[in-house]
Image: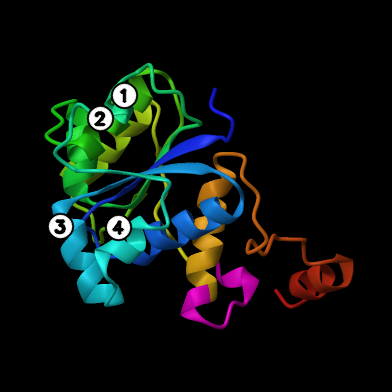
């Protein structure tokens, strides 16, 4: 394995580019070597949602790979990683992964992680879902991926959008065994509060 733990980050064209950006920032802070793949549609989303220059996002990663470079290192099973996250993950990207018909480096890298029995987390951003979407989610889950929609955790009483994003990203990184400080973990109601809730039924 490389000196630093290595992880692949994919950013696809679904809404929610901030999730991938925050993941890159946290992974950099916590000492991970990141390999970034941004889809063409994601470039548009990043500009529209974040008003950011793509080069500024790319600087957060240790290595940047072009979406069409299917000969890149991360397209091979010999490329050792702790896994890959796709944040956000579009339905198109998830569908390519589910079928194994990969048209670019992002979906190819995800396919490689699965075939090597690695950890693949897809932060799916779509709603509502039709039956085809749900069946595709089931398919990638059966293949070994984890579908992780960024659902807000209201029990944390977070007050800003930034805090909600960071909590969701932190919970996603939990799935790789990466613990960061932004996760407000559930500590239970406590005996008195639980008793009151039961008494008020």
Foreground tag (2 vs 4): 2
Which disc, if any, is residue 72?
Answer: 2
Residue 53 versus residue 12 in the image, above or below: below
Secondary structure of the residue carrying numbered label 1 = helix
Q: CA distance from mark 4 to mark 1?
A: 22 Å
Q: CA distance from mark 4 to mark 3?
A: 14 Å
Instruction: Say which residue appears at 42% left-offset and 57% top-offset.
Output: 60
User: Circle 3 sits on which residue?
Assistant: 41
Q: Earlier in the sequence, mark 2 or mark 4?
A: 2
Residue 50 versus residue 105 in the image, above or below: below
Instruction: Say which residue appears at 37% left-offset and 66% top-offset.
Output: 18
**Magenta-colored span:** 153-162
Which disc, if any, is residue 151?
Answer: none
Q: CA distance from mark 3 to mark 1?
A: 22 Å
Foreground tag (4 vs 3): 3
Secondary structure of the residue carrying numbered label 3 = helix
Q: Earlier in the sequence, mark 2 or mark 3?
A: 3
Taking depth in this image into account, of 28 and 147 the one nearest to the observer is 28
List x then y, in percent, for residue 140: 31, 32
Q: Left or right of 177: which side holds 162?
A: left
Taking depth in this image into account, of 153 and 43 the one nearest to the observer is 43
User: Circle 1 sits on which residue?
Assistant: 112
Secondary structure of the residue carrying numbered label 2 = loop
User: Circle 4 sits on which residue?
Assistant: 125
List x then y, in percent, for residue 23: 47, 56
Badge 4 density bin: few <14, some 14–19, many ≥20, Cα 10 Å: many
Q: Earlier in the sequence, mark 4 or mark 1?
A: 1
Foreground tag (4 vs 1): 1
Q: Is residue 180 magenta?
A: no
Q: CA distance from mark 1 to mark 2?
A: 12 Å
């Amino acid at each position: 394995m490389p000196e630093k733990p290595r992880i692949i980050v994919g950013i696809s064209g679904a809404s929610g580019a901030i999730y991938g950006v925050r993941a890159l920032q946290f992974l950099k802070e916590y000492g991970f070597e990141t390999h970034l793949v941004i889809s063409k549609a994601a470039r548009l989303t990043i500009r529209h949602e974040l008003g950011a220059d793509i080069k500024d996002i790319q600087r957060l990663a240790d290595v940047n790979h072009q979406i069409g470079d299917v000969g890149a290192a991360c397209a091979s099973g010999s490329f050792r990683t702790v896994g890959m996250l796709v944040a956000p993950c579009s339905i198109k990207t998830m569908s390519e992964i589910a079928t194994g018909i990969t048209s670019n480096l992002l979906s190819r890298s995800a396919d490689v992680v699965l075939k090597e029995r690695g950890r693949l987390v897809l932060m799916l951003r779509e709603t509502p879902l039709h039956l085809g979407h749900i069946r595709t989610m089931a398919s990638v889950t059966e293949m070994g991926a984890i579908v992780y929609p960024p659902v807000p955790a209201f029990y944390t009483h977070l007050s800003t959008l930034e805090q909600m994003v960071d909590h969701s990203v932190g919970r996603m990184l939990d799935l790789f065994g990466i613990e960061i400080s932004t996760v407000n973990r559930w500590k239970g109601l406590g005996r008195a509060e639980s008793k009151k809730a039961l008494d008020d039924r």
